[in-house]
Image (spheres, helix red, strand yellow):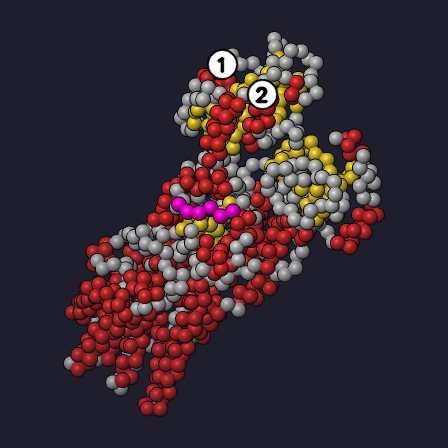
Amino acid sequence: MTAAAHRHVGLTAAAAAERLTAEGPNALAQAGRRSTVAIVLDVLREPMLALLLAGGGAYLLLGDLAEALILLAFATFSVVVTVVQEARTEHVLEALRDLSAPRALVIRDGARMRIAGREVVRDDLMVLEQGDRVAADAVLVEAADLQTDESLLTGESLPVGKTVAAEGPVPDIRRPGGEGQPFVYSGSLVTRGTGIARVIATGPRSEIGRIGQALATLDTEAPRLRRETTRIVTWCAAGGATVALLVVLLTGFLRGGWIEAILAGIAIGMSMLPEEFPVVLTVFLAMGAWRIGKVGVLTRRAAAIETLGSATVLCTDKTGTLTENRMSVAELWLPSGETLALGPGVTVPEAYRGLIETAALASAVEPTDPMEIALHAARGAAPQPGASRGALVHSYALRPELLAVSNIWDDGAALVLAAKGAPEAIAALCHLPPEPFAEMTAAIEAMAVRGIRVLAVATAAPRDRDWHETQHGYDYDLCGLVGLADPLRASVPGAVAECRGAGIRVVMITGDYAATARSIADQAGLAAGDVLTGAELAALDDARLAERLKRVTVFARIMPEQKLRIVQAFKADGEIVAMTGDGVNDAPSLKAAHIGIAMGRRGTDVAREASSIVLIEDDFGAIVQAVRLGRRIYDNIRKAMSFIFAVHVPIAGLALLPLVFGLPVLFGPIHIALLEMVIDPVCALVFEAESGEDDIMRRRPRDPSETLFSVAMVVWSVFQGCAAFATLALVFVVERSTGMSDTELRALMFFALVAEIIALILVNRAFGSSIGQAVARANAALRYVLGAIASVTVLILFVPQSQALLKFGSIRWSDMALALGLGMVLLILLEGCKPLVRHLLARLVPAGTRGLAATA
């Protein structure tokens, strides 16, 4: 290598400096990066956060310090979490820059020198050695047994061999992946051999740079749930403000008591202010991130939790995601025709141990190549009795004209030559007759169909130490074939089965070969379907691709920009797309997908930063648990929202009812605030802690066009609220007609309303109808809330000062029994109505949103 290096002069220092100035550093541009201050300002413009802050300020002005502090605390929490998450996403391109610009050994002015990767320029000569990270795209001018791992760019699980470029101009079309290329690519790793390469592309013009540019142009979609909630909150706030202003004006003009009118307006405004909506969204997603973290999934963007529960398509990479990203010996074949499939618990018979021993002897003593590591591991697991390695005395490297390597060992008694390589190369060395060659070819084809990479192994006995110039100078005997495979993760088949049972379509997108990809897909349990290669995909326009997507389950030999195109095509077809990956090549598609899922241990920083969630332990099965939790969280958000809609109807109704009858205001701001202190923890804690529905992983994903605040949910919620208000209004009218005093009536209606709020909690705990389930379903948070309500009730009943503060009259036990009875009646009525309401909604709601009738 040294002599070869001296034949090259490389650029002069002056020419390199001039080119660096003209073309820029070998790094990605940092345009568009936001500062922390800019992120904070963007967050503060979020309408939902503004509502939280406005609500907290309003309560502060009203003197309700506790409620104000609660809302302001939620607002602060939301700001901090959002800013941290947004700041982390800004590191995506930074991580990509770090990976794309390692240090490099170059030849300048005829001498080797090590420089920073960002200083490499076009036409520099890079010296490549085992273990080096390639600093820029380059074409090889010299190579000796050179192999590179390009999995970060292609997804291929194995290193690929490189050859020296032919004379003439460099081709314009070049893509990572595949054997025999003269190109090496920035970000790839040299796993074997040495070489000298002339740089042809740096920075954004390299393959990894093109990925970075694609990543920079992608915008993360605003979460659909947040958009919907912001819209409904704005409407409710506007409606509540309008009603409150109308109440103030009507009361003031009709009665002349402006102080009373203002108090009534404040009470109405507080009763209709939907501050629980942003509280629910903030708390549920924060708690959801914590719960999902307990199963080994790190949530980088909380909104992805809700989206994950609605995923309809899961696009998964093969290498390192479905497979373990390590090679292992999977099958052995002997020239006698005997075959042995290896696996957990399989004992290797004596007849096969010589084959494994010879394959290991033909490998490097300290291997770095994944296949050679696997061969040494197999040798250690099944050693050949009496085998003596001795000392390595001579080696023959892999050559373009002969894809085989040979090592000669001397144990002091005899010389042994061990060879391995491509089957056709070993067959040529063994001079196999036609019939044995046909038998070997049939065995190779059988393994290849199952996605197994095949090496042939042979041995020879050198007569003396006068080594021949090439491997062809020895008489070889075929030992057999060794099949290697990247094994499937043990958790994958079960996880794929659960995804399919939940109506999630799983497709594989990989840079590997079609036969290998199809084999892994079959082992993983993916649905039967077409295999579409990158070359075939490139020939399809968008319309024809959309048609093919319906039948394809495996995409093979796919380039990075094609992964992105596939994800975007699924999105254009209305699918909610989750994408898994771990390499640099996955980053654009991870960011473009609705939910990007990166591998934590094997994944690159680029992939992790571009993703929405990260599998901490690289456990594909954790995706299913995250989907289950995502669906549960979304269900619980719907339950909480349904309760919020329902509970505000009787509160607002009782605030308005006295105005209709010309009576004093029933509830003032202090009563509404006290009720809100019940409602807020119920929304934020009780419904968040509800366990999942029994059919949560048997139902299909919800329609992507389905809205959270659907007609079905609003109708059912308003029905609940109207039923509660109707019973309360009936009691109010009856008791008022019997001459009950205003203070006694206020106390009765307050406790009756609390009882009905508890009934609404129990009704909305589950979508199905079951009084037993509504009452007995385990929920520790509900027990604590009910205990707090009971404590406050006792405090009011037995502390006269609290009754005076609330302007309550004497409270009879019969009144308390009536209040509890109203709650029980409402619970029984609504549970009994659930099947009927669901049936009616299923007939009235349009077919596209009919699935939401289940909320009733």
Relative to 688, does residue 508 appear above or below in the rendering?
above
Residue 92 lies, in percent from the top left, at 59, 53
Helix, strand, or loop for circle 1? loop
Circles 2 and 1: CB distance less than 8 Å? no
Q: Determine whether, in the image, residue 74 is placed left or right of residue 176.
A: left
Amino acid type, callout 2: His
Q: Position of residue 6 (x, y in %)?
A: 80, 33
Q: Magenta stretch: residue 532 in it?
A: yes
Q: Which residues are magenta?
A: 528-533
748 on left or right of 46: left
Q: Which amino acid type is shown beneath numbered disc 1? A: Pro
Q: Main secondary structure of the magenta part?
A: strand
Which residue is situated farthest in the top direction here?
413
Residue indicated by mark 1: 385
At 18% from the left and 78% from the top, the residue drawn is 735
Residue drawn at point x = 21 percent, y = 71 percent:
811
Q: Nearer the viewer, residue 825 or 435?
A: 435
Frontmost of labels 2 and 1 is: 2
Whichever of callouts 2 and 1 sits on the residue coming sooner in the sequence is 1
Q: Quadrant of residue 729?
A: bottom left
Q: Quadrant of the C terminus?
A: bottom left
Question: What residue appears at the point 57 percent right and 24 percent down from the top-left corner?
Answer: 427
The residue under label 2 is 431
Task: Kindly give the residue lying farthest to the front in the view shown.
Answer: 434
Q: Is residue 500 above or below residue 432?
A: below
Q: Is residue 94 visible?
A: no
- Disc 1 crowd, CA 10 A, few/some/many (<14, 14-19, 20+): few
Left or right? Give the position of 747 relative to 117: left
**Nearest the camera: 793 or 549?**
549
Quadrant in the picture for the N terminus: top right
Residue 589 is inside the magenta segment = no
